[in-house]
Image: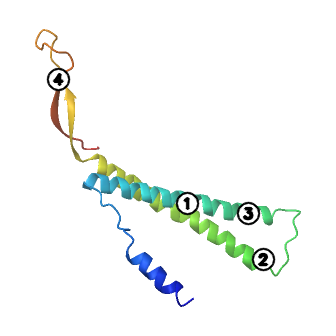
Amino acid sequence: MKILLPCLLMASSSAWAQPVAPTSPREALLLKSHNQRTAARVLLIGGAVVAGTVIYATAPGKSVSFDALPLVGGLGVAGGAAVLSSIPLFVASARNKRKAQAAISLQLQALPAPQWATARRGSMCPALGLCLPL
């Protein structure tokens, strides 16, 4: 046991575990939106499973002892709270995704030129675009 702790400290001190920072604000907002949506889905599904289990356990025909009723009621409230707490995360995720879409982007666009004007077809030109959601 005395050897295990120093070995774990040495192994963890040399580990490179720094997260990779996003290169642009757009990527940072998209990553934040993705993480918020994942957390919201976890809360929604987990709360629904807990609330569904409580509803199934207290269905007519099932015998629940009076000693377990406060626990079952508490689990039902916790499941409902988890489901309700997922709503603000979905809203924030959508807002961050909308902010990320309203960014300046640099991309290659096809030139809308007649065939006789250019010798090669489908020539590309760099273009700067600004997308503002309404």
Q: Nearer the viewer, mark 2 or mark 1?
A: 1
Q: How far separated are the C-alphas under marks 3 and 4?
A: 59 Å
Q: Secondary structure at mark 2?
A: helix
Task: Name the amino acid type tagged 4.
Answer: Leu
Q: How far separated are the C-alphas under marks 4 and 2?
A: 70 Å
Please report the residue visible at 21 percent of the width from the left and 19 percent of the height from the top: 122
Where is residue 45 drawn, in percent x and y? 60, 58
Please report the residue visible at 24 percent of the width from the left and 47 percent of the height from the top: 103
Mark 4 = which residue? 111
Q: Nearer the viewer, residue 8 or 112?
A: 8
Query: Are the residues at dot 4 and dot 2 in contact (C-beta closer than 8 Å)?
Result: no
- Residue 32 higher or lower than 67, as above or below: above
Mark 2 = which residue? 69
Where is residue 5 drawn, in percent x and y? 50, 86
Please report the residue visible at 47 percent of the width from the left and 86 percent of the height from the top: 6
Query: Are the residues at dot 2 and dot 1 in contact (C-beta closer than 8 Å)?
Result: no
Please report the residue visible at 62 percent of the width from the left and 71 percent of the height from the top: 78
Q: Nearer the viewer, residue 104 or 92?
A: 104
77 with respect to 62 (left or right)? left
